[in-house]
Image (cartoon, rainbow, N blue to C red):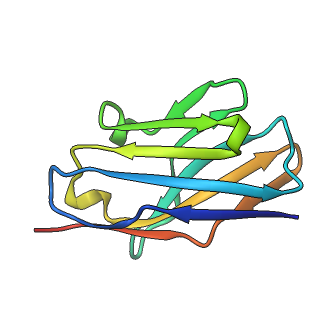
Amino acid sequence: QVQLMESGGGLVQPGGSLRLSCVASGNIVRISTMGWYRQAPEKERELVAHITWGGTIKCADSVKGRFTISRDNAKNTVYLQMNSLKAEDTAVYYCNLAGIGIAYWGQGTQVTVSS
């Protein structure tokens, strides 16, 4: 079993920054992809960015140039640095860990961008 613990969400003004963290614990699959998804009210959950064990990154077009994903394999932690936040970034952000035939989700952390 794997547990994902997210932190770092909150309320921020447009143009501001937040940094999300997600720590994985338990039976970690070494070859895994960690990432972030988000779900806004009345919208489907969408990929924000993910990063493989080897460091290959996939990022949504809507956040390119503003968000940066990184991971520390020694700490089983993935980070999402979010800069130049916009109102449309408001959502619940979920941490995800995926391997071959498995996927785990965190409980989600709220990010609200509002003046």
Q: Which residue is located at x 56 percent, y 63 percent?
A: 6
Q: Tell me if residue 57 comes above or below residue 78 in the rendering.
A: above
Residue 65: x, y in percent?
Answer: 31, 30
In the foreground, 29 or 64:
29
Left or right, residue 27 beside residue 62: right
In the foreground, 79 or 99:
79
The image quadrant that residue 43 belongs to is: bottom left
Q: Residue furthest front?
A: 74
Left or right, residue 40 beside residue 98: left
Left or right, residue 94 beside residue 17: right
Q: Which residue is located at x 55 percent, y 32 percent?
A: 58
Q: What count of labels does the image hold?
A: 0
Q: Tell me if residue 63 comes above or below residue 40 in the rendering.
A: above
In the foreground, 87 or 43:
87
Residue 80: x, y in percent?
Answer: 46, 45
The image quadrant that residue 91 belongs to is: bottom left
Residue 76: x, y in percent?
Answer: 71, 45
Q: Which residue is located at x 68 percent, y 32 percent?
A: 52
Q: Quadrant of the C terminus?
A: bottom left
Q: Which residue is located at x 21 percent, y 54 percent?
A: 86
Residue 95: x, y in percent?
Answer: 60, 57
The image quadrant that residue 107 belongs to is: bottom right
